[in-house]
Image: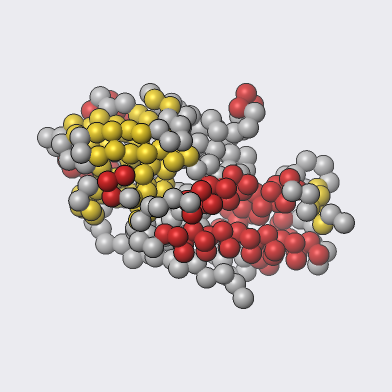
């Protein structure tokens, strides 16, 4: 029996409008819907008067203009970036230029990779972004009437940082945990071992609500996170079953494992299987002919 994830996908919004979603949080959704962004990038505004902006979004000037309209009469003191994919961080540049606010993030794209002297990146990374202030797990950022704790959650990307609004026990989860879909974990910058550890970290916290960058809030987060962990563990078992049946290549496994998924998403699914395969090889459960890669042959370890 497959793991059931309690997806939440209903979200009421109008592109460009600023919606007050809690006493301290407002949201403006960018008009960049896709198979990976759902309805679009949700940019959050924390506080009133002196505010922080979380994930300014893609380089779409109508979205930047909508943000500026929402911020009229206020001071932006912090621009917070969960990670450096092209639908999250590029608009930080014009927003910083127009408001003078510094940017805060774990680091540039690939900054959290092991062996950072030889960083590998993917096509969708925002390679231009470099934060004014590099933050680390446990750092506290404060503004007028609000405070944010930095929660380092690598896995989707190596520099992924969640931000916890302490006054509302609310966690801005970026792409680490979303209500509408599972998160893509794509090597080389994505890492399944770190992603699973980051999910486990969330179970140890007392956040009461998640605000992902895409889709609606998750109001009952713990069962959701447990379901995500169980889902990934189920994927591992499926991979092991495929290997036991004689399939040795990821390309042959994906059509079987993701038979119910739109074929246009199979390339992304293959990269997710690759991330699992790296994790299985690292734990000694699976062996690869040569270095693990998307096109390598794999086998169960005796």
Which residue is found at the position 71% from the left and 61% from the top? 239
The one nearer the camera, 60 or 250, is: 250
The residue located at (33%, 39%) in the rendering is: 148
Residue 58, visible in the rendered structure: no
Q: Position of residue 301 (x, y in %)?
A: 84, 54
Quadrant of the image occupied by residue 243: bottom right
- Going 23% across and 28% down the picture, which residue do you hit? 99
On the picture, is 40 further left or further right than 155?
left
Q: Position of residue 77 (x, y in %)?
A: 25, 30
Q: Is residue 26 left or right of residue 242?
A: left
Visible in this render: residue 230? Answer: yes
Q: Above or below — where is 76 with respect to 177?
A: above
Whole-percent x, y for residue 16 in the image: 23, 49
Q: Quadrant of residue 149?
A: top left
Residue 220 sits above or below residue 126 on the image: below
Q: Please name the residue shown 31% across and 26% down the image.
A: 102
User: Nearest the camera: 166 or 121?
Assistant: 166
Instruction: Point out the residue furthest to the bottom here.
Output: 1
Quadrant (top left/top right/bottom left/bottom right) for the N terminus: bottom right
Q: Residue furthest left?
A: 73
| Quadrant where the image shows the C terminus | bottom right
In screen coordinates, is 101 left or right of 123?
Answer: left
Q: Is residue 129 above or below residue 293?
A: above
Is 161 on the left-hand or right-hand side of 97? right
């Amino acid at each position: 029996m497959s793991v059931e994830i309690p997806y939440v996908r209903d979200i009421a919004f109008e592109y460009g409008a600023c919606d007050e979603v809690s006493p301290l949080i407002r949201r403006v959704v960018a008009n960049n819907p896709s198979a990976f962004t759902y309805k679009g990038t949700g940019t959050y505004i924390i506080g009133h008067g002196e505010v922080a902006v979380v994930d300014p979004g893609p380089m779409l000037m109508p979205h930047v203009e909508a943000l500026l309209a929402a911020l009229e009469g206020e001071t932006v003191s912090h621009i917070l970036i969960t990670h450096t994919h092209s639908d999250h961080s590029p608009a930080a540049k014009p927003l910083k230029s127009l408001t003078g606010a510094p940017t805060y993030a774990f680091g540039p794209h690939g900054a959290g990779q092991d062996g950072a002297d030889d960083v590998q990146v993917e096509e969708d990374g925002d390679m231009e972004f470099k934060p004014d202030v590099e933050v680390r797990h446990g750092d506290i950022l404060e503004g007028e009437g609000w405070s944010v704790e930095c929660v380092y959650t690598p896995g989707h990307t190596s520099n992924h940082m969640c931000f916890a609004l302490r006054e509302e026990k609310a966690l801005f989860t970026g792409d680490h945990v979303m209500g509408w879909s599972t998160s893509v974990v794509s090597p080389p910058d994505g890492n399944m071992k770190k992603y699973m550890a980051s999910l486990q970290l969330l179970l140890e916290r007392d956040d009461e609500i998640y605000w992902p960058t895409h889709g609606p809030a998750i109001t009952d987060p713990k069962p959701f996170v447990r379901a995500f962990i169980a889902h990934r563990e189920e994927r591992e078992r499926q991979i092991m079953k495929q290997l036991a049946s004689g399939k040795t290549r990821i390309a042959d496994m994906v059509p079987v494992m993701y038979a119910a998924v739109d074929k246009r998403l199979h390339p992304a699914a293959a990269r997710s299987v690759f991330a699992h395969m790296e994790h299985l090889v690292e734990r000694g459960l699976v062996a690869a002919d040569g270095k693990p890669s998307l096109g390598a042959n794999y086998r169960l370890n005796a």
